[in-house]
Amino acid sequence: MNIAWSGSTRLLTGPAGLADWLDDFDDARGRAGSPDTALLLDPAVTESRITALVTAELDRAGHTTRRIVPGGDGGPDEILALADATADADLIAVIGGGSVIDRAKLLAVAHEDRRARADLRTTGRSGLLTLDARTRRARPLLAVPTTVGTGAELSRVACLPHNSGKRLVMSDALAPDAALLDPAATETLPAELLVEGALEALFRTVGPYVGNLLDRPVEDALAQSAAVQLARLGGETARQLAAGRTPDAELRMDLARLSGLTQSTWLSYGRDLFSTEGWMIANELSSALGTRKMTAVAALLPPLWQAVLAGDTRLGSAPRLWRIWDLLRSADSSGDPLPAEPAAGITALMDRWGVARDLTLPPPLLETVARRTVRTWGAGLPMLGGLRTADVSALLTAAA
């Protein structure tokens, strides 16, 4: 195939959007014969309505579709095996949550680029792996997310198991060519994962905003607007759930769109890339405990914000935190007014939304997580912003 696919991810809505994109794919392909599509599926969605919808559109476009249900740990061995198994496919498509979308993104670049194959097998201590700037894909990638929060369908990153935790892999080549959003994709998503998804997207938006000390009026306005809408949507989701209702299709679609758009480079343009220390600590904490990432994030958020308010500029700007929290507390109208103080306020918001944040972290494991966090993201590496083991331990102690 001689067509090189690149550029921003095209956002598709519903079957009509997918049909239009598949027509464009067929025109760009420029070859006779039935296109071959490798369709990766999360085990939970093999018989779902969204899978039937996507498969029907692929059939209508004349594609020969091979279903693949990954069953490994998502590590380098599985990624490279999947790359080999899909070597003849004209199109890589994936339906599922962030984990299976990450597999599809990584296998696509691993198949096309020998440097990427070698990089994925590296065993250094760093939790961040930036692929060579020359890394490219020759085949298109279509992502269909069935969760909200990760924004994996629009991001240029993917997670890979690494040293009992997760490594963050970065490359422009990891951004899918198209992302399909449809209410059918989230109609069976458990309630707790829907509200956690809203909080995850909010955390991803507010974290860099607070973590950077300098004002950038244009980017700040974009981040503020996205954060306010996420607080409003999260509050409405919690309100509908509290009333015993399943969040409606329009609300789920709004959350899905905004969740993905928080991965936009415009929100972080000109900002320090390494201003998300909370994510790194939560990443190691959730891996150590075997708990959901957002449970760890929810436990860490209040002490993280308390440290910022106390003046720890390594973690962020207190004035900027006060500023954005003042906007957020006014956006969620699903109950009584939230506390004005940011750390108390975010605690109340998470309780209102029903986000679990109780963790049991024995002291020996706490110290292990603290040391591993610093080894993986700090200790001379730039990602942890100068935090030491004692600093991470204090945050974990407060979280647990």
Image: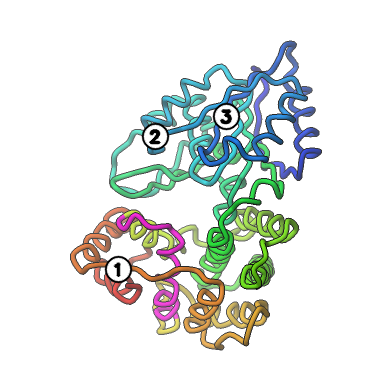
Q: Considering only order in the chain, which callout, 3 or 1, is on the residue closer to the N terminus?
A: 3
- Of discs 1 and 3, which sits in the foreground? 1
Q: Is residue 145 above or below residue 19?
A: below
> The residue under label 1 is which amino acid type?
Thr
**Residue 222 in which image quadrant:** bottom right
Discs 2, 1 touching: Cβ within 8 Å? no
The residue labelled by disc 1 is 360
State the colouring used for the structure image.
rainbow
Pick the front one: 206 or 299:
299
User: From where the camera sits, is residue 339 visible?
Assistant: yes
Q: Secondary structure at mark 1?
A: loop
Q: Considering only order in the chain, which callout, 2 or 3, is on the residue closer to the N terminus?
A: 2
How many other residues sit within 10 Å of disc 3, few (<14), some (14-19) or many (≥20)? many
- Of discs 3 and 2, which sits in the foreground? 2
**Residue 13 in which image quadrant:** top right
Q: CA distance from mark 3 to mark 2?
A: 24 Å
Q: Considering only order in the chain, which callout, 1 or 2, is on the residue closer to the N terminus?
A: 2
> The residue under label 2 is which amino acid type?
Gly
Image point 38% across, 71% down: which residue? Answer: 358
Which portion, as a residue range, is magenta?
A: 288-308
Determine if the magenta segment contains residue 234.
no
Image point 57% across, 66% down: which residue? Answer: 202
Image point 58% across, 25% down: which residue? Answer: 38
Q: Quadrant of the C terminus?
A: bottom left
Report whether 168 appears left or right of 322: left
Image point 72% across, 45% down: which residue? Answer: 11
The residue labelled by disc 2 is 72
